[in-house]
Image: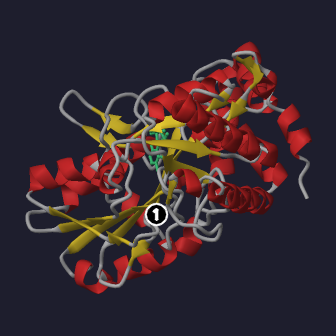
Amino acid sequence: MIDINEIRNDFPILSRKVNGHQLVYLDNAATTHKPRSVINALVDFYENHNSNVHRGVHTLSMEATDQFEEAREKISSFINSETSQSIIWTRNASESLNIISYSWGYKNISEGDEILLSPMEHHSNLIPWQELARVKGAKIKYLSLNDDGTLDLSNIDELMTSNTKLVSIVHVSNALGTINPVKELCEKAHQVGALFVLDGAQSIPHMLVDVQEIDCDFFVFSGHKMMGPTGIGVLYGKMEVLEKMDPVFTGGEMVLEVSYEKASWADIPMRFEAGTPNIADSIALGTAVDYLQNIGMDNIHNYEKTITSYGLEKFKELESEGVTLFGPKSSELKGAVFSFHIPGIHPHDLGTILDGMGIAVRTGHHCAMPLIRSLGVSATARASFYVYNTLNEVDLLIDGIKSTIRYFTDGSN
Ligand code: C6P
């Protein structure tokens, strides 16, 4: 059992008021709040250890280097990678995916090759492959979706063939909440000789992810969606794959030997980390991992399943108002993400009215424009929960939606 009130007390921002109401923060898929320990880690670094890493023999530089590399170790054991060398610091999941595309993709994808994606990919796991395919003359194929927002794998053997060189799939959809069967997809990809990229931006904050168990070739995520700072992300790659890749960015710290004519590359991960890295935020992401592990990823996942089940029940109360909830209707298949449409009320209007009640949701296409359009709408409202949210906040959301519908129907609320 976890004590949600105790957890909430660790997040200073959760006690603030918005528009005269207690903040109800339901935009966790966009970014999450930071516990005091993460904020303190940033302050501690700048107040006591600030220095560049891997460059100095002085005390501060060695302290900074130790903390920075310790954070890498923490990430490595958090996702159970074979070695911390497989952990490359990036700015975010988007940058990680672009590095895979520019480095691995440009070297290994040729004309006629196929890249298989799902229809629920975030733009960050779509556009890098579209660009790669355009330049190389490769082809992008898409899995199909069932009506409930899960992947239809019935035709997978027709879609995944010896032409498929790369399969890149989101672990948990930011727009539908769908939890995808990634181990199975990864196994299938390997059977046809393709590499498997897993976008973990919405899974790693909420559940235990073991990259060796899944056997993915790459795993990417962003620190800010898992209680860490913005501006720090991770690219995990299998060593045997990373070793054959060239750097995308060149410059300081990523080289072994440099002459006026040429350069040779440093070992991994430094090869992919040109220039001064984001030291403080990497260290604070390590602190976020400590915080998550202290609660326990299984505890987080189980608690959020309770929120999902409760939310699914409560949304049924809105069916008579014509409200459509997109995505799977079971907490086994879906994370605590509720994307919905109310006929006659634009999501932006709903979002603005909810904000007046102190409730923060995201409205729009959620950087998954093709998916949202395929649902027959141009935008949805999305409420996304985290471990510090309460069941009472589900009630407040549902009440807020009901009162908005009343307001649009007869002017009352
Ligand atoms: N989704 C959302 O509100 P960045 O922006 O690089 O930290 O993460 C990109 C990204 C990649 N994959 C998935 C599945 C994501 O959900 C996101 C970010 C946010 O849904 C911001 S658009």
Q: Residues within 10 Å of mark 1 (few under 14, many from 20)?
A: many
Give the image location of residue 75, x and y in percent: 64, 50
The N terminus, quarter of image? bottom right
Task: Return the residue at label 1.
Answer: 238
Asked if residue 87 lies left or right of residue 253, the reply is right
Callout 1 amino acid:
Lys
Give the image location of residue 378, x and y in percent: 33, 43
In the image shown, does 86 or 391 lie closer to the viewer? 391
Asked if residue 410 lies left or right of residue 146, the reply is right
Taking 211 as reference, is 43 above or below it?
Answer: above
Residue at point 74%, 25% (across, down): 39
Residue at point 31%, 81% (across, down): 156
The C terminus, quarter of image? top right
In the image shown, does 290 or 117 lie closer to the viewer? 117
Residue 277 visible in this rendered orientation of the protein: no
Q: Which image quadrant is residue 119 in?
A: bottom left
Taking 45 as reference, is 385 above or below it?
Answer: below
Asked if residue 36 lies left or right of residue 318, the reply is right
Give the image location of residue 150, x and y in percent: 46, 70
Secondary structure beneath disc 1? loop
Residue at point 63%, 59% (across, down): 316
Taking 108 as reference, is 323 above or below it?
Answer: above
Residue at point 91%, 48% (across, down): 3
